[in-house]
Image (cartoon, rainbow, N blue to C red):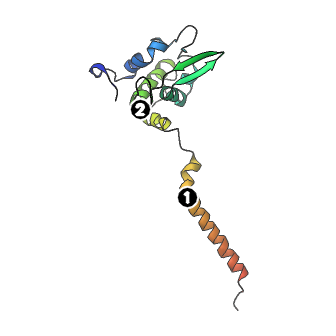
Amino acid sequence: HLVTANNTLNDGVSLYSAYCSSCHQNTGAGTPDQFYPSLFNNTATGDFNPSNIIAAILNGVERTVDGKEYYMPSFGQNSPTQALTDEQIALITQFVYQKYGHPDVVITPTMVKEIRQGGAVPFLLTLQPYFLPATIIIALLILWGIIRLIRPKKR
């Protein structure tokens, strides 16, 4: 559960200020060397699909570019700093999108939950419980057809 003084971290602006601005700055400009990247003119905030930025907030970022290590802590379940709820991450992401990206994109806690669980389930995977029964039925129909062909016909 999120620890807040006087329950004041309850909107995107205050959550961004508490968890993001120390690295990305209050202006969203990041650092001059882009060790902490700018949030405007950024592919993650400029995309109409917010999955990338939500995943970055949930899972953090660890990468090496030109021998330089870049790090952003995760704010998901195993966060080394503070785990945030789906609603809080949705509020932060919505604020960032409105301020630095596409203001028309709506981010919901349900979207965050889906990404937290690994993303949308592929259509074929939703059909998986029906594969075995369908295979058995098809095999029985084929067997029935073969038996009808082989059996002598009555006159």
Question: Farthest residue toward the bottom?
Answer: 155
The amino acid on which the numbered mark 2 sits, given as a three-letter code, is Asp
Estimate the x, y position of residue 70 in percent, counting from the top left. Answer: 57, 18
Task: Return the mark for residue 130.
Answer: 1
Which residue does the image show at 45% across and 18% down from the upper left?
Answer: 20
Please give left or right for residue 82 compared with residue 45 in the image: left
Location of mark 2 (residue): 86
Please give left or right for residue 147 compared with residue 109 in the image: right
Q: Quadrant of the N terminus?
A: top left
Q: Quadrant of the C terminus?
A: bottom right
Which residue does the image show at 61% across and 63% down from the upper left?
Answer: 135
Instruction: Give the structural element (helix, strand or loop) at label 2.
Output: helix
Estimate the x, y position of residue 35 in percent, counting from the top left. Answer: 56, 13
Q: Nearer the viewer, residue 11 or 86?
A: 86
Circle 1 residues within 10 Å: few <14, some 14–19, many ≥20: few
Q: Nearer the viewer, residue 92 or 71?
A: 71
